[in-house]
Image (cartoon, helix red, strand yellow):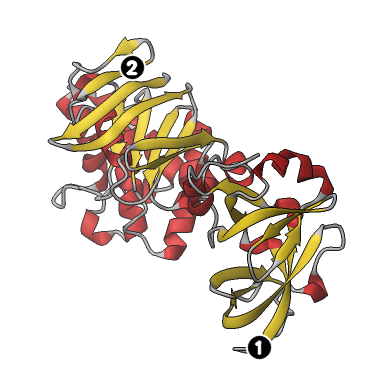
Amino acid sequence: MASVTFDHVYKRFGDVVAVNDLNLEIADREFLVLVGPSGCGKTTALRCLAGLEDVSEGRILIGDQVVNDVAPKDRDIAMVFQSYALYPHMSVYDNMAFGLKLRKTPKDEIDRRVKKAADILGIGHLLDRKPRQLSGGQRQRVAVGRAIVREPKVFLFDEPLSNLDAKLRVETRANISKLHQQLQTTFIYVTHDQIEAMTMATRIAVINKGILQQVDTPQTLYDRPDNLFVAGFIGSPSMNFFPAKLRKDGDDLYVDGGTFALKVPSDRKQAYMKEVDRDIIFGIRPENIHNPEFAPPSIDGQLVECVVDVTELMGNEILVYLKTGNNSFVARVDPRSRYQIDQKVQMVFNMNAMHIFDRETELAIR
C-alpha cells in the first residue's frame, strides 16, 4: 500500500501547460477522484504518475520514493483505461494472466490470483470465454481484473465507464466502490462526470485548465465551494448564478438582482456587510428553489417572480426552467407541482443555502 504525492508538478507540451504547479497528497488507501472538463489536465496528471508521460518540472512520489525516473513497469501501479484493450484471441483467464506470465510469476500463483480476482468481480463463470462473447460491462470487469491480479500499491482508473450505457455505468460504479473497500488499496480515478466523482470518492480534486481548484470531501465541495468554477461544476443540474449587488436598507441586507431583492438571513448578514454596493455573483442550487405550495416550513424563504420556460418531468421530481428579467435558471421542485409554459409564477429561494462570489476574482465570499 502507498500514498501518492504530486510536488509542484508541471507538464508542458510546447507552449501549452497541461498541468500547472500541481500540489496534491493522496493518502494510503484513499479513493481520490480527479474531476474536471475535457482538456483540463486530469488524464495528463494520471499519465505522469503512471510514467507514460515525463514530468516537465516537480516531483511525483509513491510512498517515500521519487518515481520521476522510474520505469512504468517498476512503479508498482496498475492502470485501467477507457478502452478495454483486451486481446481478442485470448480467453478471459489468459487476458487476466498475461501480465503475470510476462513477469514469470509461478503458474500456481497466477492461478490463485486470477481466480481470486474473478471471484471478487463475479466473473468466475466467464474465464473460458473470449472477449467477443462478453457484454461491455463484462469486458470492463475483465480489464479491472487484469489490474487486480498485479496486486499493485496503487490503482489508476482513466474514465473506465465512458463506454458503458447508463444502467451499466451505475452498476459498475457501485462495483468499483465495493472493490476499493475489499482491496483496501489506494485508488486514483479520473472522470469528467461529477456524479461519478460525488458517489465514489473519499475526496475529490477539481481541476480546470491544468490548475487544481479545490480538493475536499464530496459534501464539502457541494456545500462550500471555494470559487465559481467549483460551484458550477459540482452538482447536477449545476448551481444557478445571477449578477447582483449587496444593498443595505436600514438594518437589513439584500441581494439586489434588478428584478428581485432577496433579504439576507440575519445570521449571515454580518459576514457580507463589507461587500455592500459591490458587484457580486449570487448563487443558489436548483434543489434550494421551491414551489411555494411545497416549500419546507423551516427555511428562510424569499419570493422571486418569474416566467416558466420549460418543464422536465422526471417522475420523482420536476425540473422547471424559468426566467426573471434577463436571467435564466432552473429549479428542482416537488413532483406534485403543476406548471404551464409562459405561466407567471413565484418561486421560493431558500436563502439559508445562498452563495456569494466576488465578480472579479470569482472566489467565494464566506
Q: Residue at x 52, y 43 (%)?
A: 227
Residue 239's x, y, as percent?
56, 58
Q: What is the x, y in percent for residue 36? A: 39, 47
* Res. 323 visible in picture: yes
Q: Which mark is residue 61?
A: 2
Residue of label 1:
343
Q: Compared to 4, does 172 lie above or below?
A: below
In what quadrant of the picture does the C terminus appear? top right
Query: x%, y% of residue 222?
Result: 59, 46
Which residue is at a point 26% across and 47% down the rendered structure image? 92
Is 68 placed left or right of 222 in the picture? left
- Residue at 61% of width from left, 82% of height from top? 308
The label nearer to you, 2 versus 1, is 1
Comparing 327 with 41, the one in front is 327
Splitting the image into 4 quarters, where does residue 45 fall?
top left
Give the crowd class for mark 2: few <14, some 14-19, many >=20 residues within 10 Å: some
Relative to the observer, which residue lies in front, 318 or 85? 318
**Amino acid identity at mark 2:** Leu
Could you tell me the amino acid type at mark 1?
A: Gln
Q: Secondary structure at mark 1?
A: loop
Q: CA distance from mark 2 to mark 1?
A: 58 Å
Report helix, strand or loop for mark 2. Answer: strand
Residue 105 visible, this angle? no
